[in-house]
Amino acid sequence: MRSKFASLLFIFFFILFGLVSQNGNCKTPKTPVQSANNPEDSPSYEDNQFCLRCHASGYFVLTSEISGKQKKQAMPDNFRIFPEKFYNGVHWQFGCTDCHSSEYHTFPHAAELRFDVPFACIDCHGGDEATAKYHFEEIQVEYEKSVHAKLPNDEFNCWKCHDPHSYAPLARRDTLTTDFVVSSNQMCLKCHGNFDVFQLLSEKKELTEVVKNHSWLPNQALHFRSVRCLECHSAQNQDILISHNIMPKDSAVHDCVRCHSGNSLLMGTLYKFRTVESRKSYGFVNAAIIDNNSYVIGANHSRFMNISGIIIIIMTLLAIAIHTIFRIRKSKN
């Protein structure tokens, strides 16, 4: 009798877990392999080689017009271009002089060229039907509300965060990784973690201590590895993938519940790209978080899984109770 009951109980749990697995469909999505672009396929490859012979190197050579002597000079980091990054970025088919003046072909470069106003994203992508789905006009409107747009002398521009020589839209990948979060945060720390760069844009005499100012965060190191600065420091907009409205520091999110809840803030920020598709495929609110191999306390909720868990607990307690009754009856006999 006990053997038959145990068999029926096993079959019941097998069917129940099968239903959970079928409904949840919790499979790790495969990340499509993106092949590197072939630099020689770029129509501007030969022209770019003229610039990269110096800018892809760690040095350049100056020649004295009087004595004819030559001297090597270190190439500053902010003027150095890495070809492998450039040819895997979104602008890989462009030529250097598509964005920079053709006068840069003269070396040494004229100092006056430094004062050329660089193109902004909207200059090329504004009104472009091919990129309309990325909402560049709305991004521009959001940016103009940002604290960055209020910096003096209009010194801040798109390229302070998005290097046009290497930019790749990582947020649109099927699966988000730690590398994506680190890469995003490096954009912020490039200024906010380096006083030499920070003082070029700010009149402040000292750099804010990022780690100290975030000491209120529990398990701080894990937050820094897993969450972008943008999650707490930007105002969200439902129409664009990544918010560009950076808020003042006193407006930053300090409420843990905003992320650690069933309606997690992360669903409209970090996991935004996967949210709609995941809701359709998985059928529960925060599937996108699980879909990206992540676990956020308080945010990973599935109503079906919750009910199934309660049923399993009840059935387990019932099985124990029935087993106990059988043992008591047998001992009396």
Image (tube, grey):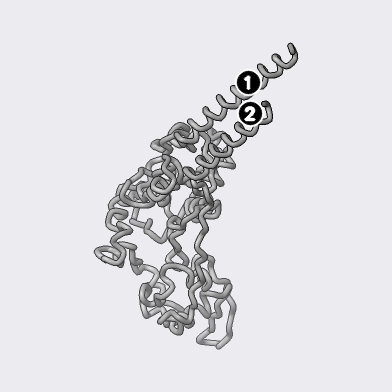
Vertical order, 299 against 49 (above or below):
above
Which part of the image, by quadrant, shows the N terminus?
top right
Q: Splitting the image into 4 quarters, where does residue 13 fall?
A: top right
Q: Which of these two is toward me, 271 or 141?
A: 271
> Which residue sits furthest left?
127
Q: Residue at x 60, y 32 (%)?
A: 8
Residue with the mark numbered 2: 5
Residue 30, given in percent of the width and then of the height, sits at 52, 58
* Res 195 visible: no
Q: Residue at x 33, y 49 (%)?
A: 150
- State which mark lies toward you, 2 or 1: 2
Which type of secondary structure does the marked residue at label 2 adopt?
Answer: helix
Residue 123, given in percent of the width and then of the height, sits at 29, 65
Whether label 2 touches label 1, CB < 8 Å:
yes
Q: Amino acid at mark 1?
A: Ile
| Dot 2 alpha-carbon crowd within 10 angstroms: few under 14, some 14 to 19, many 20 or more | few
Which type of secondary structure does the marked residue at label 1 adopt?
Answer: helix
Vertical order, 58 against 64 (above or below):
above
Residue 3, given in percent of the width and then of the height, sits at 68, 30
Vertical order, 323 against 25 (above or below):
above
Vertical order, 53 against 277 (above or below):
below
| Dot 1 alpha-carbon crowd within 10 angstroms: few under 14, some 14 to 19, many 20 or more | some
Which part of the image, by quadrant, shows the C terminus?
top right
Disc on the earlier residue, 2 or 1:
2
Q: Which of these two is toward me, 19 or 298?
A: 19
Residue 78, given in percent of the width and then of the height, sits at 50, 65
Q: Which of these two is toward me, 266 or 56?
A: 266
The label on residue 322 is: 1
* Res 134 visible: yes
